[in-house]
Every structure is written in structure tokens, then in C-alpha cells.
Amino acid sequence: MLDASSVDWTAFPDIYGETGEVLPALRAIRSADADTRRAAYEDLAGRLVSQGSRSAPARSRRAS
């Protein structure tokens, strides 16, 4: 399994530009707190899909 902290997330801009919040959101998804998990999921989903369109990183991953 890939260690998410080893990925240079800034190399994959999302619809908001910088992706510095991706790693903390990925970590939060593993939280024991349901509200924390839900908020992290919503944050990541909002970064990957906007108005029905996937961001460039999401498209390139799906194509492989």
C-alpha cells in the first residue's frame, strides 16, 4: 500500500489550486469520529468533482 505522505500532493492541483489539504483529509477519513470522517470525505469529494466534472488528477487516475 502506498504511503500517502510520500506523495507530492502539490504536483496534482485540484479545482481550488493547491492540494496541501489532501493529506490531512486522507488522514481524517481514518478518524474514529464519524463527523470528522464525513467532513473529510465531503472535502475530498468537493476537490475531485465540481459541478459534475472530475478534476485533472481524478481523470488521469481513472484513465489508467
Image: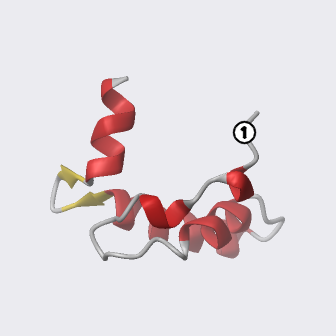
Residue that appears at 63% across and 66% down? 23
The residue labelled by disc 1 is 2
Say few, some or many: other residues with alpha carbon within 10 Å of mark 1 (under 14 / 14 to 19 / 20 or more).
few
**Residue sitting at the far right:** 32
Q: Nearer the viewer, residue 1 or 6?
A: 6
Give the quarter of the figure containing the N terminus. Answer: top right
Q: Position of residue 13 (x, y in %)?
A: 36, 65
| Residue 20: % across, % down | 53, 76
Vertical position of residue 59 compared to residue 55: above or below = above
Image position, residue 53 (x, y; %): 17, 52
Q: Let me know if residue 46 appears in the view.
A: yes
The one nearer the camera, 6 or 45, is 6
Number of marks in the rendered image: 1
Residue kind at label 1, given as amino acid type: Leu
Question: In the image, what residue occupies the spot 35% across and 57% down?
Answer: 48
Res. 38 in view: no
Q: Secondary structure at mark 1?
A: loop
Up-down: is 7 above or below 19? above
The furthest residue to the top: 64
Compared across the picture, whether 55 is left or right of 32 comes to left
Quarter occupied by residue 59: top left
Quarter of the figure with residue 29: bottom right
> How does the figure colour the protein chain or chains?
secondary structure
Seen at 66% across and 74% down, the residue is 35
Please give left or right for residue 15 compared with residue 48 in the image.
left
Q: Quadrant of the C terminus?
A: top left
